Image (spheres, helix red, strand yellow):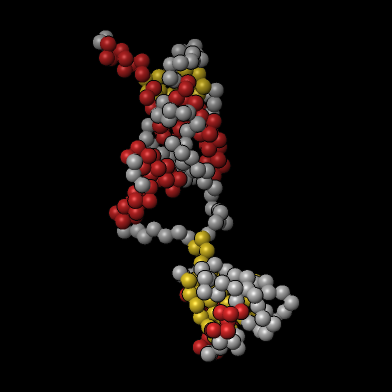
């Protein structure tokens, strides 16, 4: 046998993982340099062997197949959530960034590509979306605040959360009824956000009474130095959706 063939045979390892027998290339097992598998098969540490000479790994053999396929470039996402959770625990144990979902896999691959090619992630993502005719947007909702100075407190309350700006504007029109085009209604905008103020004061008078009236950035209703007379305010504010949505699988962020 030639030296090249001998070296190739040595690089193909037989594995006994929880009684399940596999074979894998050393290069694939060491794909993720910081992982436990890379340390095990780096040649720096002695390996445990079974009676047949296979490398012995005392873990779940059925779950390990998913990890082994992933190391060889094949991603299989289990449909059963209980299996996905168990698989994540195995992946964490071995230090392998196995994706929890297809979206997680695409994110990992995109980040890996950007790190290796020194490409800006945002630029790569925009290119990906353009190639499929997609539009990149961040999920948002529209929050409608209401503030009235007629009571003892001037604290604003949220009277509605809407999926689109059009729905929020329809809610404002319903709240104001016929007053939306009244001369006593002042409308101002900042970015995508909009605010309607109802009072008997002119705009010039409002500017004198309200702190930072000109500097409103569209975030909330601000805290004003409010007169005793009645002022009502409706603010429609765009906010990003934060955290996990209901029924959304948790995604654990991993970096390669």
Q: In the image, 205: left or right of 116?
A: right
- Tell me the residue at 46%/28% (across/down): 34
Residue 231 place in picture, x, y as percent: 63, 82
- Tell me the residue at 47%/36% (across/down): 97
Q: In the image, 243: left or right of 110?
A: right
Residue 32 place in picture, x, y as percent: 43, 30
**Nearer to us in this view, 180 or 70:** 180
Count the marks: 0
Q: Quadrant of residue 23?
A: top left
Visible residue check, residue 146: no
Residue 103 place in picture, x, y as percent: 44, 48
Quarter that holds the C terminus: top left
- Tell me the residue at 55%/40% (across/down): 85
**In the rendered image of this protein, does residue 174 appear above or below residue 222?**
below
**Nearer to us in this view, 123 or 83:** 123
Q: Quadrant of residue 9?
A: top left
Visible residue check, residue 210: yes
**In the rendered image of this protein, does residue 3 appear above or below residue 42?**
above
**Nearer to us in this view, 189 or 128:** 189
């Amino acid at each position: 046998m030639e030296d090249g063939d001998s070296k190739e045979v040595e690089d193909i390892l037989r594995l006994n993982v929880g009684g399940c027998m596999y074979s894998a290339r050393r290069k694939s097992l060491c794909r993720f340099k910081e992982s436990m598998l890379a340390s095990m098969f780096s040649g720096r540490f002695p390996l445990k062997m079974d009676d047949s000479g296979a490398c012995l790994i005392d873990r779940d053999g059925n779950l390990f197949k998913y990890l082994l396929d992933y190391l060889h470039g094949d991603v299989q996402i289990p449909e059963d959530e209980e299996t996905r959770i168990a698989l994540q625990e195995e992946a964490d144990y071995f230090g392998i960034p196995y994706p929890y979902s297809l979206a997680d896999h695409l994110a990992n691959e995109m980040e890996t590509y950007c790190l290796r090619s020194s490409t800006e992630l945002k630029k790569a993502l925009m290119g990906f979306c353009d190639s499929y005719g997609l539009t990149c947007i961040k999920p948002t909702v529209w929050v409608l605040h209401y503030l009235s100075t007629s009571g003892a407190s001037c604290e604003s309350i949220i009277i509605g959360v809407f999926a689109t700006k059009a729905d929020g504007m329809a809610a404002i029109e319903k709240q104001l009824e016929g007053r939306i085009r009244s001369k006593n209604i002042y409308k101002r905008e900042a970015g995508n956000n909009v605010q309607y103020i109802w009072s008997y004061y002119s705009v010039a008078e409002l500017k004198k009474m309200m702190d930072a009236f000109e500097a409103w950035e569209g975030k909330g209703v601000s805290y004003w130095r409010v007169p005793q007379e009645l002022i009502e305010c409706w603010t429609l504010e765009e906010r990003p959706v934060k955290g996990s949505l209901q029924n959304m699988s948790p995604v654990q962020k991993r970096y390669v």
